[in-house]
Amino acid sequence: MAQKLWEKSVQVNAEIDRFTVGKDREMDLYLAKHDVIGSMAHITMLESIGLLASDELDVLLEELKKIYASAEKGEFVIEDGIEDVHSQVELMLTRRLGDIGKKIHSGRSRNDQVLVDLKLYTREQIRLLAESVEDLFHVLLAQSEKYKHVLMPGYTHLQIAMPSSFGLWFGAYAESLVDDMLFLQSAYRMCNRNPLGSAAGYGSSFPLDREMTTRLLGFDSMNYNVVYAQMGRGKMERNVAFAMASIAGTLAKMAFDACMFSSQNFGFVKLPDECTTGSSIMPHKKNPDVFELTRAKCNKLQALPQQIMLIMNNLPSGYFRDLQIIKESFLPAFDELQDCLHMATYIMDKLYINEHILEDDKYLYMFSVEEVNRLAASGMPFRDAYKKVGLDIEAGRFTHSKKVHHTHAGSIGNLCNDRIEELMREVMHGFHFERAAAAEKELLGR
């Protein structure tokens, strides 16, 4: 068994080691390249305050760039007996450079090291999520424009209610994603603050230049108070999980609509045949399994904030090993949400729309409000118009043109898609992802 960074003369019991390490080696593979980036910034700062010689910094940076490249290619491994990614990187440096490799941990704890790793990983994942959400947004808005004149029933209580349109339906989910992105942007801003230098949560007697590491890593600012930096462990993940849950909520609702509207009882939409599955006994079946799984996965993702909250809840200030378990739920969640976004984007782009829904007279009564409004506009008191139309329906005398004329903002005839698109553009610009990307590129010398 390899010695731990913290071990002295006594090795830990093998069963205790298995239990306490848990899935950390597996989870830390998500963080590998970000651990290297954080170390590059840290040692660059150490050289500036005299804790590393310039020639030592040069060779360390060169080796760290090689480790980063291996992590980027998916070739980085955490060896058996090595506790975590931090230990593996330090071991690789020490093997290649000798005692110089042991100097990179000065002024740092694994506590602030994993904090910065998690923040660097999370901000990258938020950027990738935002880009995927934007892709789905543009598909939904394009479909809204394409089918804006195709009417469909709107429902309340799952009862036929009033005229809607596919323009409204697609556009509603597009605008929902804008609000989800606002939530994600807030989470990004809370994430994009530098905890490095907080060490084990109480700072260091070394004269660390935390402004320098903040700048080198492209953070917007630092977590100034070192105790609060440690208190942010779990809180950051929970806040980001709430933003992810908001996106997942939009996807789950949209998936439910798609499943319901594609059933024969509705027949509003049809999924491409290649995107459906069949039955082992019923040869006619074309099942919307992709949307059913999307609904289930996204509902599961909506439980993620509560799962994180229950792990971290009621812990006092300072570090506790409980927080390690959050990684097992949090880190893989990004891939799951990305998968759902990609599937939804692909299928919503190829969805077949029934443009003849209203030929079925069972939808006639959804025009009852249109008739009430027509009578009221011609001078009849609204309550009298409402009663007249109600009595006509009861007597089977109701009839109405299956056309509508809505003009106000956000209605069938005035979707405001251009304004919704501008809202999304503003939100995307507000992330300022380019700052982090430029900082990391400069640090890697690319």
Image: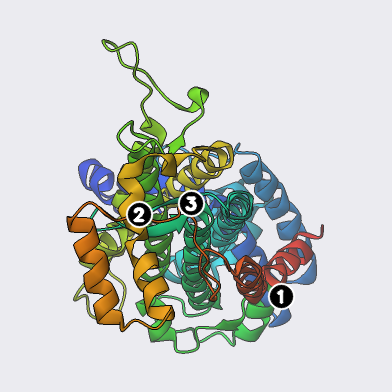
Question: SS for tag 1?
Answer: helix
Which label number is shown at residue 151?
Answer: 3
- Kind of residue sitting beneath label 1: Glu
| Of pointers 1 and 3, the one earlier in the residue sequence | 1
Percent across and percent down for residue 100 are 65, 60
Say if mark 2 contacts mark 1, CB within 8 Å.
Answer: no
Give residue 277's position: percent from left, percent from top.
40, 22
Cα distance between the residues tagged 1 and 3? 67 Å
Measuring from the top left, give residue 305's x and y in whole percent. Answer: 30, 63
Q: Residues within 10 Å of mark 1 (few under 14, many from 20)?
A: some
Q: Is residue 18 above or below residue 89?
A: above
| Residue 16 image point, x, y percent | 22, 47
Q: Residue at x 62, y 76 (%)?
A: 219
**Which secondary structure, mark 3?**
strand
Above-or-below relation of 220 to 397: below
Q: Earlier in the sequence, mark 2 or mark 1?
A: 1
Give the crowd class for mark 2: few <14, some 14-19, many >=20 residues within 10 Å: some
The answer to whether residue 83 of the structure is visible from this angle is no
Residue pointed to by mark 2: 399
Q: Give the alpha-carbon distance from disc 2 to disc 1, as whole Å.
A: 83 Å
Residue under circle 1? 47
| Kind of residue at disc 2 | Thr
The answer to whether any part of residue 140 appears in the image is yes
